[in-house]
Protein backbone atom coordinates (compact mmCIF):
# COMPACT_ATOMS: atom_id res chain seq x y z
CA UNK A 1 0.00 0.00 0.00
CA UNK A 2 1.32 3.45 -0.94
CA UNK A 3 1.12 5.85 1.98
CA UNK A 4 -0.17 9.39 1.62
CA UNK A 5 -0.69 12.18 4.14
CA UNK A 6 -4.13 11.06 5.34
CA UNK A 7 -3.63 7.30 5.13
CA UNK A 8 -4.38 5.91 8.60
CA UNK A 9 -1.43 3.99 10.03
CA UNK A 10 -2.23 0.88 12.01
CA UNK A 11 -0.30 -0.24 15.06
CA UNK A 12 1.35 -3.65 15.15
CA UNK A 13 -1.74 -5.70 15.90
CA UNK A 14 -4.07 -3.72 13.61
CA UNK A 15 -1.64 -4.24 10.74
CA UNK A 16 -1.33 -7.94 11.64
CA UNK A 17 -5.13 -8.27 11.74
CA UNK A 18 -5.51 -6.71 8.28
CA UNK A 19 -2.68 -8.86 6.99
CA UNK A 20 -4.36 -12.00 8.30
CA UNK A 21 -7.78 -10.95 6.99
CA UNK A 22 -6.27 -10.43 3.53
CA UNK A 23 -4.85 -13.95 3.69
CA UNK A 24 -8.17 -15.28 4.95
CA UNK A 25 -9.97 -13.56 2.08
CA UNK A 26 -7.52 -15.04 -0.40
CA UNK A 27 -8.03 -18.48 1.11
CA UNK A 28 -11.84 -18.15 1.04
CA UNK A 29 -11.78 -17.02 -2.59
CA UNK A 30 -9.30 -19.53 -3.97
CA UNK A 31 -9.80 -22.58 -1.71
CA UNK A 32 -13.36 -22.49 -0.36
CA UNK A 33 -15.19 -20.67 -3.16
CA UNK A 34 -14.62 -23.42 -5.79
CA UNK A 35 -16.46 -25.84 -3.50
CA UNK A 36 -19.69 -23.99 -4.29
CA UNK A 37 -19.54 -25.09 -7.90
CA UNK A 38 -18.70 -28.64 -6.84
CA UNK A 39 -21.67 -28.59 -4.45
CA UNK A 40 -23.87 -27.28 -7.24
CA UNK A 41 -22.75 -29.83 -9.81
CA UNK A 42 -22.56 -32.88 -7.55
CA UNK A 43 -25.52 -32.58 -5.22
CA UNK A 44 -27.65 -29.46 -5.60
CA UNK A 45 -28.23 -29.57 -9.37
CA UNK A 46 -29.03 -33.32 -9.26
CA UNK A 47 -31.59 -32.62 -6.58
CA UNK A 48 -33.04 -29.77 -8.63
CA UNK A 49 -33.25 -32.04 -11.69
CA UNK A 50 -34.89 -34.80 -9.65
CA UNK A 51 -37.49 -32.50 -8.15
CA UNK A 52 -38.18 -30.26 -11.16
CA UNK A 53 -37.41 -32.58 -14.07
CA UNK A 54 -35.49 -29.83 -15.90
CA UNK A 55 -32.56 -27.41 -15.62
CA UNK A 56 -33.06 -24.15 -13.72
CA UNK A 57 -33.86 -21.22 -15.97
CA UNK A 58 -32.57 -18.39 -13.79
CA UNK A 59 -30.60 -17.55 -10.64
CA UNK A 60 -33.78 -17.08 -8.60
CA UNK A 61 -34.65 -20.78 -9.09
CA UNK A 62 -31.20 -21.84 -7.91
CA UNK A 63 -31.19 -19.72 -4.76
CA UNK A 64 -33.54 -21.74 -2.50
CA UNK A 65 -31.69 -24.94 -3.39
CA UNK A 66 -28.16 -23.61 -2.83
CA UNK A 67 -29.19 -21.83 0.35
CA UNK A 68 -29.87 -25.24 1.91
CA UNK A 69 -26.40 -26.51 1.01
CA UNK A 70 -23.95 -26.76 3.89
CA UNK A 71 -20.89 -25.73 1.87
CA UNK A 72 -22.61 -22.66 0.45
CA UNK A 73 -23.78 -21.75 3.95
CA UNK A 74 -20.25 -22.07 5.32
CA UNK A 75 -18.66 -20.08 2.50
CA UNK A 76 -21.32 -17.38 2.91
CA UNK A 77 -20.70 -17.16 6.62
CA UNK A 78 -16.94 -16.93 6.14
CA UNK A 79 -17.32 -14.16 3.59
CA UNK A 80 -19.86 -12.13 5.53
CA UNK A 81 -17.76 -12.39 8.68
CA UNK A 82 -14.71 -11.28 6.73
CA UNK A 83 -16.54 -8.14 5.59
CA UNK A 84 -17.66 -7.37 9.14
CA UNK A 85 -14.22 -7.98 10.63
CA UNK A 86 -12.56 -5.85 7.98
CA UNK A 87 -14.73 -2.88 8.93
CA UNK A 88 -14.40 -3.51 12.65
CA UNK A 89 -10.59 -3.46 12.41
CA UNK A 90 -10.54 -0.50 10.02
CA UNK A 91 -12.88 1.52 12.20
CA UNK A 92 -11.02 0.67 15.40
CA UNK A 93 -7.79 1.81 13.73
CA UNK A 94 -9.31 5.03 12.39
CA UNK A 95 -11.52 6.00 15.33
CA UNK A 96 -8.75 5.85 17.96
CA UNK A 97 -6.76 8.47 15.97
CA UNK A 98 -9.68 10.31 14.39
CA UNK A 99 -8.96 13.74 15.83
CA UNK A 100 -5.43 13.61 14.41
CA UNK A 101 -6.55 12.29 11.01
CA UNK A 102 -9.24 14.97 10.73
CA UNK A 103 -6.70 17.64 11.69
CA UNK A 104 -4.28 16.43 9.01
CA UNK A 105 -7.03 16.54 6.37
CA UNK A 106 -8.19 19.96 7.61
CA UNK A 107 -4.69 21.37 7.16
CA UNK A 108 -4.51 20.11 3.58
CA UNK A 109 -8.08 21.16 2.74
CA UNK A 110 -8.18 24.65 4.31
CA UNK A 111 -9.36 27.33 1.89
CA UNK A 112 -8.71 25.13 -1.11
CA UNK A 113 -10.57 26.24 -4.24
CA UNK A 114 -10.58 22.60 -5.27
CA UNK A 115 -12.87 21.37 -2.48
CA UNK A 116 -16.50 22.52 -2.70
CA UNK A 117 -18.73 21.13 0.05
CA UNK A 118 -22.44 21.77 0.48
CA UNK A 119 -23.45 21.21 4.12
CA UNK A 120 -27.12 21.75 3.13
CA UNK A 121 -27.15 18.89 0.64
CA UNK A 122 -29.62 16.12 1.54
CA UNK A 123 -28.23 12.61 1.14
CA UNK A 124 -29.84 10.43 -1.55
CA UNK A 125 -31.91 7.68 0.08
CA UNK A 126 -29.82 4.98 -1.62
CA UNK A 127 -26.91 6.07 0.57
CA UNK A 128 -28.86 6.23 3.82
CA UNK A 129 -31.36 3.33 3.61
CA UNK A 130 -28.66 0.74 4.21
CA UNK A 131 -24.95 0.85 4.89
CA UNK A 132 -23.59 -0.34 1.55
CA UNK A 133 -21.15 -3.29 1.68
CA UNK A 134 -21.61 -3.57 5.45
CA UNK A 135 -19.70 -0.38 6.23
CA UNK A 136 -21.19 0.92 9.49
CA UNK A 137 -22.39 4.49 9.01
CA UNK A 138 -22.08 4.29 5.24
CA UNK A 139 -20.09 6.91 3.34
CA UNK A 140 -21.82 9.95 4.77
CA UNK A 141 -21.91 9.66 8.57
CA UNK A 142 -19.83 12.30 10.37
CA UNK A 143 -18.65 11.63 13.92
CA UNK A 144 -16.70 14.86 14.35
CA UNK A 145 -16.42 18.20 12.57
CA UNK A 146 -14.59 17.91 9.23
CA UNK A 147 -14.84 14.14 9.51
CA UNK A 148 -13.02 11.77 7.14
CA UNK A 149 -13.49 8.55 9.14
CA UNK A 150 -15.70 6.75 6.60
CA UNK A 151 -13.16 7.28 3.81
CA UNK A 152 -10.14 6.50 5.98
CA UNK A 153 -11.66 3.18 7.06
CA UNK A 154 -12.64 2.33 3.48
CA UNK A 155 -9.17 3.14 2.12
CA UNK A 156 -7.30 1.32 4.89
CA UNK A 157 -9.23 -1.94 4.43
CA UNK A 158 -9.72 -2.07 0.68
CA UNK A 159 -6.66 -4.19 0.06
CA UNK A 160 -8.06 -6.84 2.43
CA UNK A 161 -10.94 -7.63 0.09
CA UNK A 162 -9.15 -6.97 -3.20
CA UNK A 163 -5.94 -8.85 -2.27
CA UNK A 164 -3.96 -5.88 -3.55
CA UNK A 165 -5.35 -6.44 -7.03
CA UNK A 166 -6.28 -2.77 -7.40
CA UNK A 167 -2.65 -1.74 -6.89
CA UNK A 168 -0.82 0.15 -4.14
CA UNK A 169 -3.15 3.14 -4.53
CA UNK A 170 -6.32 1.00 -4.85
CA UNK A 171 -6.84 2.76 -8.18
CA UNK A 172 -6.88 -0.21 -10.56
CA UNK A 173 -10.32 0.64 -11.95
CA UNK A 174 -9.24 4.16 -12.87
CA UNK A 175 -6.04 2.86 -14.47
CA UNK A 176 -8.18 0.40 -16.47
CA UNK A 177 -10.25 3.29 -17.81
CA UNK A 178 -7.04 5.10 -18.82
CA UNK A 179 -5.80 1.91 -20.54
CA UNK A 180 -9.14 1.73 -22.39
CA UNK A 181 -8.53 5.19 -23.85
CA UNK A 182 -5.00 4.23 -24.94
CA UNK A 183 -6.38 1.18 -26.74
CA UNK A 184 -9.68 2.45 -28.16
CA UNK A 185 -9.48 6.26 -28.30
CA UNK A 186 -5.80 7.30 -28.31
CA UNK A 187 -6.66 10.69 -29.88
CA UNK A 188 -9.39 11.56 -27.38
CA UNK A 189 -8.33 14.64 -25.43
CA UNK A 190 -11.04 15.93 -23.11
CA UNK A 191 -10.74 19.39 -21.55
CA UNK A 192 -13.42 18.93 -18.89
CA UNK A 193 -14.05 15.59 -17.20
CA UNK A 194 -16.79 14.75 -14.70
CA UNK A 195 -16.32 11.63 -12.54
CA UNK A 196 -19.64 10.84 -10.83
CA UNK A 197 -19.70 8.90 -7.56
CA UNK A 198 -15.99 9.59 -7.24
CA UNK A 199 -15.73 8.33 -3.67
CA UNK A 200 -12.27 9.28 -2.43
CA UNK A 201 -11.11 9.99 -5.98
CA UNK A 202 -9.39 6.64 -6.45
CA UNK A 203 -10.35 6.59 -10.12
CA UNK A 204 -10.47 10.32 -10.84
CA UNK A 205 -6.74 10.71 -10.10
CA UNK A 206 -5.51 8.31 -12.82
CA UNK A 207 -7.73 10.21 -15.28
CA UNK A 208 -6.31 13.53 -14.09
CA UNK A 209 -2.78 12.21 -14.55
CA UNK A 210 -3.58 10.74 -17.99
CA UNK A 211 -5.18 14.01 -19.16
CA UNK A 212 -3.03 16.66 -17.42
CA UNK A 213 -4.45 19.44 -19.59
CA UNK A 214 -7.99 18.65 -18.42
CA UNK A 215 -9.89 19.85 -15.39
CA UNK A 216 -11.44 16.89 -13.60
CA UNK A 217 -14.52 17.41 -11.46
CA UNK A 218 -14.77 14.56 -8.95
CA UNK A 219 -18.34 14.50 -7.68
CA UNK A 220 -19.93 12.69 -4.77
CA UNK A 221 -22.78 13.24 -2.31
CA UNK A 222 -20.80 12.27 0.81
CA UNK A 223 -18.55 14.91 2.35
CA UNK A 224 -16.17 12.56 4.26
CA UNK A 225 -15.12 10.99 0.95
CA UNK A 226 -14.51 14.37 -0.69
CA UNK A 227 -12.49 15.77 2.23
CA UNK A 228 -10.34 12.66 2.26
CA UNK A 229 -10.11 12.55 -1.54
CA UNK A 230 -8.99 16.16 -1.79
CA UNK A 231 -6.39 15.80 0.98
CA UNK A 232 -5.15 12.58 -0.64
CA UNK A 233 -4.89 14.26 -4.07
CA UNK A 234 -2.94 17.21 -2.63
CA UNK A 235 -0.63 14.83 -0.82
CA UNK A 236 -0.05 12.84 -4.02
CA UNK A 237 0.67 16.03 -5.98
CA UNK A 238 -2.34 15.89 -8.32
CA UNK A 239 -3.62 19.43 -8.86
CA UNK A 240 -6.17 19.27 -11.67
CA UNK A 241 -9.01 17.63 -9.74
CA UNK A 242 -11.80 19.62 -8.08
CA UNK A 243 -13.82 17.69 -5.47
CA UNK A 244 -17.46 18.78 -5.51
CA UNK A 245 -20.36 17.74 -3.27
CA UNK A 246 -23.56 17.46 -5.30
CA UNK A 247 -26.46 15.08 -5.82
CA UNK A 248 -25.89 13.36 -9.18
CA UNK A 249 -29.66 13.43 -9.81
CA UNK A 250 -29.56 17.23 -9.92
CA UNK A 251 -26.20 18.39 -11.24
CA UNK A 252 -25.48 22.10 -10.84
CA UNK A 253 -23.64 22.29 -14.17
CA UNK A 254 -24.94 23.87 -17.38
CA UNK A 255 -25.83 21.81 -20.41
CA UNK A 256 -23.01 20.61 -22.65
CA UNK A 257 -20.30 21.47 -20.11
CA UNK A 258 -18.20 18.26 -20.15
CA UNK A 259 -16.30 16.33 -22.84
CA UNK A 260 -16.16 13.18 -20.76
CA UNK A 261 -18.36 11.81 -17.98
CA UNK A 262 -17.07 8.68 -16.21
CA UNK A 263 -18.26 6.43 -13.42
CA UNK A 264 -16.47 3.47 -11.85
CA UNK A 265 -18.42 0.89 -9.84
CA UNK A 266 -21.02 3.55 -9.15
CA UNK A 267 -24.35 2.47 -10.64
CA UNK A 268 -24.76 -0.67 -8.50
CA UNK A 269 -24.74 1.53 -5.41
CA UNK A 270 -27.61 3.73 -6.66
CA UNK A 271 -31.27 2.73 -7.09
CA UNK A 272 -33.89 1.97 -9.77
CA UNK A 273 -35.39 5.44 -9.19
CA UNK A 274 -32.10 7.34 -9.22
CA UNK A 275 -30.42 5.62 -12.18
CA UNK A 276 -32.59 7.03 -15.01
CA UNK A 277 -32.45 10.51 -13.48
CA UNK A 278 -28.66 10.41 -13.18
CA UNK A 279 -28.25 9.04 -16.72
CA UNK A 280 -30.43 11.89 -18.02
CA UNK A 281 -28.17 14.34 -16.19
CA UNK A 282 -25.11 12.70 -17.75
CA UNK A 283 -26.67 13.20 -21.20
CA UNK A 284 -27.58 16.81 -20.39
CA UNK A 285 -24.11 17.92 -19.26
CA UNK A 286 -22.25 16.19 -22.12
CA UNK A 287 -21.03 18.46 -24.92
CA UNK A 288 -21.62 17.44 -28.56
CA UNK A 289 -19.28 14.52 -29.40
CA UNK A 290 -18.66 14.11 -25.68
CA UNK A 291 -18.35 10.64 -24.20
CA UNK A 292 -20.02 8.85 -21.32
CA UNK A 293 -18.00 5.85 -20.10
CA UNK A 294 -18.92 3.60 -17.15
CA UNK A 295 -17.06 0.72 -15.54
CA UNK A 296 -19.14 -1.85 -13.66
CA UNK A 297 -19.28 -5.40 -12.40
CA UNK A 298 -20.23 -7.88 -15.15
CA UNK A 299 -23.79 -7.95 -16.42
CA UNK A 300 -25.84 -11.09 -15.75
CA UNK A 301 -27.30 -10.97 -19.26
CA UNK A 302 -26.17 -14.04 -21.19
CA UNK A 303 -24.54 -15.51 -18.08
CA UNK A 304 -25.29 -19.13 -17.06
CA UNK A 305 -27.84 -19.25 -14.22
CA UNK A 306 -25.38 -20.68 -11.69
CA UNK A 307 -22.77 -17.96 -12.40
CA UNK A 308 -25.39 -15.24 -12.05
CA UNK A 309 -26.57 -16.82 -8.79
CA UNK A 310 -23.12 -16.95 -7.22
CA UNK A 311 -22.25 -13.41 -8.38
CA UNK A 312 -25.46 -12.18 -6.84
CA UNK A 313 -24.30 -13.12 -3.35
CA UNK A 314 -23.32 -9.54 -2.58
CA UNK A 315 -26.82 -8.22 -3.16
CA UNK A 316 -28.50 -9.64 -0.07
CA UNK A 317 -25.41 -10.66 1.88
CA UNK A 318 -23.08 -7.70 1.52
CA UNK A 319 -25.70 -4.94 1.71
CA UNK A 320 -25.79 -4.10 -2.00
CA UNK A 321 -29.56 -3.78 -2.51
CA UNK A 322 -29.44 -2.62 -6.15
CA UNK A 323 -26.72 -5.08 -7.21
CA UNK A 324 -28.91 -7.81 -8.75
CA UNK A 325 -31.42 -5.51 -10.44
CA UNK A 326 -28.67 -3.40 -12.02
CA UNK A 327 -26.78 -6.38 -13.39
CA UNK A 328 -29.95 -7.60 -15.10
CA UNK A 329 -30.66 -4.24 -16.76
CA UNK A 330 -29.86 -3.55 -20.39
CA UNK A 331 -27.74 -0.43 -20.01
CA UNK A 332 -27.93 0.43 -23.71
CA UNK A 333 -31.73 0.58 -23.39
CA UNK A 334 -31.33 2.73 -20.29
CA UNK A 335 -28.98 5.13 -22.07
CA UNK A 336 -31.42 5.39 -25.01
CA UNK A 337 -34.21 6.22 -22.55
CA UNK A 338 -31.96 8.90 -21.07
CA UNK A 339 -31.64 10.58 -24.48
CA UNK A 340 -28.62 8.95 -26.13
CA UNK A 341 -28.93 7.68 -29.71
CA UNK A 342 -28.91 3.89 -29.82
CA UNK A 343 -26.30 3.69 -32.59
CA UNK A 344 -23.97 5.86 -30.49
CA UNK A 345 -24.26 3.56 -27.43
CA UNK A 346 -21.88 0.66 -26.84
CA UNK A 347 -20.89 -2.05 -24.42
CA UNK A 348 -17.21 -2.73 -23.82
CA UNK A 349 -14.69 -4.39 -21.53
CA UNK A 350 -11.96 -2.96 -19.32
CA UNK A 351 -8.80 -4.97 -18.84
CA UNK A 352 -7.72 -5.14 -15.19
CA UNK A 353 -4.42 -3.41 -14.46
CA UNK A 354 -2.88 -5.81 -12.00
CA UNK A 355 -0.08 -5.03 -9.61
CA UNK A 356 2.19 -8.10 -9.62
CA UNK A 357 4.76 -6.57 -7.29
CA UNK A 358 2.13 -6.13 -4.61
CA UNK A 359 0.67 -9.57 -5.21
CA UNK A 360 4.05 -11.24 -4.75
CA UNK A 361 4.87 -9.20 -1.66
CA UNK A 362 1.74 -10.50 0.03
CA UNK A 363 2.48 -14.03 -1.16
CA UNK A 364 -0.66 -14.02 -3.29
CA UNK A 365 -1.01 -15.21 -6.84
CA UNK A 366 -3.14 -13.41 -9.38
CA UNK A 367 -6.27 -15.46 -8.85
CA UNK A 368 -9.52 -13.81 -9.79
CA UNK A 369 -11.64 -12.37 -7.03
CA UNK A 370 -14.45 -14.07 -8.91
CA UNK A 371 -14.47 -11.42 -11.60
CA UNK A 372 -12.90 -8.50 -9.81
CA UNK A 373 -9.40 -9.26 -11.05
CA UNK A 374 -9.40 -9.93 -14.78
CA UNK A 375 -11.82 -7.71 -16.64
CA UNK A 376 -14.64 -5.33 -15.91
CA UNK A 377 -17.81 -4.75 -17.85
CA UNK A 378 -18.20 -1.34 -19.46
CA UNK A 379 -20.81 0.65 -21.28
CA UNK A 380 -20.97 4.12 -22.71
CA UNK A 381 -22.32 6.44 -25.35
CA UNK A 382 -21.23 9.33 -27.51
CA UNK A 383 -23.34 12.46 -27.23
CA UNK B 1 3.59 1.38 28.20
CA UNK B 2 0.00 2.30 29.02
CA UNK B 3 -3.03 1.40 26.95
CA UNK B 4 -4.56 4.20 24.85
CA UNK B 5 -7.83 5.66 26.17
CA UNK B 6 -10.93 3.77 25.03
CA UNK B 7 -12.29 4.89 21.65
CA UNK B 8 -15.13 7.38 21.77
CA UNK B 9 -17.02 5.39 19.13
CA UNK B 10 -17.75 1.69 18.91
CA UNK B 11 -15.86 0.16 16.01
CA UNK B 12 -18.01 -2.98 16.18
CA UNK B 13 -21.19 -0.97 15.51
CA UNK B 14 -23.36 -2.97 13.06
CA UNK B 15 -24.03 -1.82 9.51
CA UNK B 16 -27.57 -0.62 8.82
CA UNK B 17 -29.43 -3.30 6.85
CA UNK B 18 -30.66 -6.87 7.20
CA UNK B 19 -28.23 -9.30 8.79
CA UNK B 20 -28.32 -12.50 6.71
CA UNK B 21 -28.57 -15.86 8.45
CA UNK B 22 -26.97 -18.72 6.55
CA UNK B 23 -27.45 -21.83 8.72
CA UNK B 24 -30.63 -23.61 9.75
CA UNK B 25 -29.72 -23.07 13.40
CA UNK B 26 -28.90 -19.43 14.23
CA UNK B 27 -26.51 -20.69 16.90
CA UNK B 28 -24.21 -21.87 14.12
CA UNK B 29 -24.13 -18.35 12.67
CA UNK B 30 -23.22 -17.03 16.11
CA UNK B 31 -20.58 -19.71 16.56
CA UNK B 32 -18.99 -18.94 13.18
CA UNK B 33 -18.46 -15.30 14.13
CA UNK B 34 -16.95 -16.36 17.47
CA UNK B 35 -14.62 -18.89 15.85
CA UNK B 36 -13.48 -16.48 13.14
CA UNK B 37 -12.76 -13.74 15.67
CA UNK B 38 -10.80 -16.23 17.79
CA UNK B 39 -8.88 -17.48 14.78
CA UNK B 40 -8.01 -13.95 13.73
CA UNK B 41 -6.81 -12.98 17.18
CA UNK B 42 -4.72 -16.14 17.33
CA UNK B 43 -3.08 -15.19 14.03
CA UNK B 44 -2.47 -11.66 15.31
CA UNK B 45 -0.90 -13.04 18.49
CA UNK B 46 1.24 -15.46 16.47
CA UNK B 47 2.45 -12.55 14.36
CA UNK B 48 3.23 -10.46 17.44
CA UNK B 49 5.24 -13.32 18.87
CA UNK B 50 7.09 -13.59 15.57
CA UNK B 51 7.88 -9.89 15.84
CA UNK B 52 9.12 -10.30 19.41
CA UNK B 53 11.37 -13.16 18.38
CA UNK B 54 12.80 -11.25 15.46
CA UNK B 55 13.34 -8.07 17.48
CA UNK B 56 15.02 -10.04 20.25
CA UNK B 57 17.23 -11.74 17.76
CA UNK B 58 18.20 -8.51 16.04
CA UNK B 59 18.74 -6.38 19.13
CA UNK B 60 19.79 -8.93 21.68
CA UNK B 61 17.27 -7.36 24.04
CA UNK B 62 13.60 -6.41 24.09
CA UNK B 63 11.77 -3.11 24.14
CA UNK B 64 8.01 -2.92 23.63
CA UNK B 65 8.39 0.13 21.46
CA UNK B 66 10.76 -1.82 19.24
CA UNK B 67 8.01 -4.44 18.78
CA UNK B 68 5.49 -1.70 18.01
CA UNK B 69 7.83 -0.04 15.53
CA UNK B 70 8.96 -3.24 13.87
CA UNK B 71 8.37 -3.19 10.10
CA UNK B 72 8.85 -6.53 8.37
CA UNK B 73 11.07 -6.60 5.30
CA UNK B 74 10.02 -8.41 2.13
CA UNK B 75 11.37 -11.76 3.31
CA UNK B 76 9.61 -11.50 6.67
CA UNK B 77 6.36 -10.52 4.90
CA UNK B 78 6.64 -13.54 2.67
CA UNK B 79 7.37 -15.83 5.67
CA UNK B 80 4.33 -14.42 7.43
CA UNK B 81 2.09 -14.90 4.41
CA UNK B 82 3.16 -18.55 4.36
CA UNK B 83 2.60 -18.83 8.09
CA UNK B 84 -0.96 -17.56 7.68
CA UNK B 85 -1.69 -19.81 4.72
CA UNK B 86 -0.46 -22.84 6.67
CA UNK B 87 -2.55 -21.82 9.65
CA UNK B 88 -5.59 -21.35 7.40
CA UNK B 89 -5.16 -24.85 6.00
CA UNK B 90 -5.35 -26.25 9.54
CA UNK B 91 -8.11 -23.82 10.52
CA UNK B 92 -10.32 -24.78 7.55
CA UNK B 93 -9.35 -28.46 7.58
CA UNK B 94 -12.88 -29.78 8.13
CA UNK B 95 -14.38 -27.63 5.39
CA UNK B 96 -11.62 -28.30 2.86
CA UNK B 97 -11.62 -32.06 3.50
CA UNK B 98 -15.38 -32.19 3.01
CA UNK B 99 -14.94 -30.22 -0.21
CA UNK B 100 -12.28 -32.67 -1.43
CA UNK B 101 -14.57 -35.61 -0.73
CA UNK B 102 -17.32 -33.86 -2.65
CA UNK B 103 -15.11 -33.06 -5.64
CA UNK B 104 -13.82 -36.65 -5.76
CA UNK B 105 -17.26 -38.22 -5.55
CA UNK B 106 -18.37 -39.90 -8.77
CA UNK B 107 -22.03 -40.11 -7.97
CA UNK B 108 -24.08 -37.35 -6.40
CA UNK B 109 -24.37 -37.93 -2.68
CA UNK B 110 -27.31 -36.70 -0.64
CA UNK B 111 -26.50 -33.82 1.65
CA UNK B 112 -26.56 -34.53 5.36
CA UNK B 113 -29.55 -32.58 6.66
Image (cartoon, coloured by chain):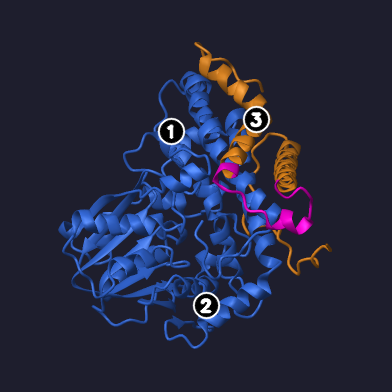
Chain colours: A blue, B orange
Q: Which residue is mark 1?
A: A306
The span picked out in magenta is: B58-76
* Residue B69 is one of the magenta-drawn residues: yes
Residue B64 position (above or below residue A215):
above
Q: Which residue is mark 2?
A: A122
Q: Which residue is mark 3?
A: B92
Quarter of the rendering occupied by the C terminus of chain B: top right
Asked whether the residues under marks 2 and 3 belong to the same chain, the reply is no
Query: Is residue A342 visible to the viewer in this orientation of the structure?
Result: yes
Viewer-closest of A228 and A259:
A228
Q: Quick one: label 1, few (<14), some, or many (20+) residues within 10 Å?
A: many
The location of residue A368, given as percent across then percent down, is: 43, 39
The location of residue B32, given as percent across then percent down, is: 71, 38
Residue A29 position (above or below residue A203):
above
Viewer-closest of B26 and A26:
A26
Q: CA distance from mark 1 to mark 3?
A: 25 Å
> Helix, strand, or loop for circle 1?
helix
Residue A262 position (above or below residue B66):
below
Name which quarter of the figure residue A272 lies in: bottom left
The residue positioned farthest toward the front in the image shown: B60
Amino acid sequence: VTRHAVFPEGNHDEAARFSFLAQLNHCIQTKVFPGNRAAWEKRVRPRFLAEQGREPTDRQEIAPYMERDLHYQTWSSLRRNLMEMRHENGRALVLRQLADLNARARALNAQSPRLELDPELGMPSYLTARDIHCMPGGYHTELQADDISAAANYDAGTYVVTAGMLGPLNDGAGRSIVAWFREHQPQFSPRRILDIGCGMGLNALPLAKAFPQAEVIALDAAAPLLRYGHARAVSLGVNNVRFVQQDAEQLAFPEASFDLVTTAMFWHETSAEALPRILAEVRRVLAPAGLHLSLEQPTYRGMPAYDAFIRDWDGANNNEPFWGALHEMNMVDEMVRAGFERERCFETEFVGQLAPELASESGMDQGRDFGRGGTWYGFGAWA
Amino acid sequence: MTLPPPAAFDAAHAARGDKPRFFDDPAVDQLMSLVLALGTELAVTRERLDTVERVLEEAGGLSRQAVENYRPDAAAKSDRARLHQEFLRRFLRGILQEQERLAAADAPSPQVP
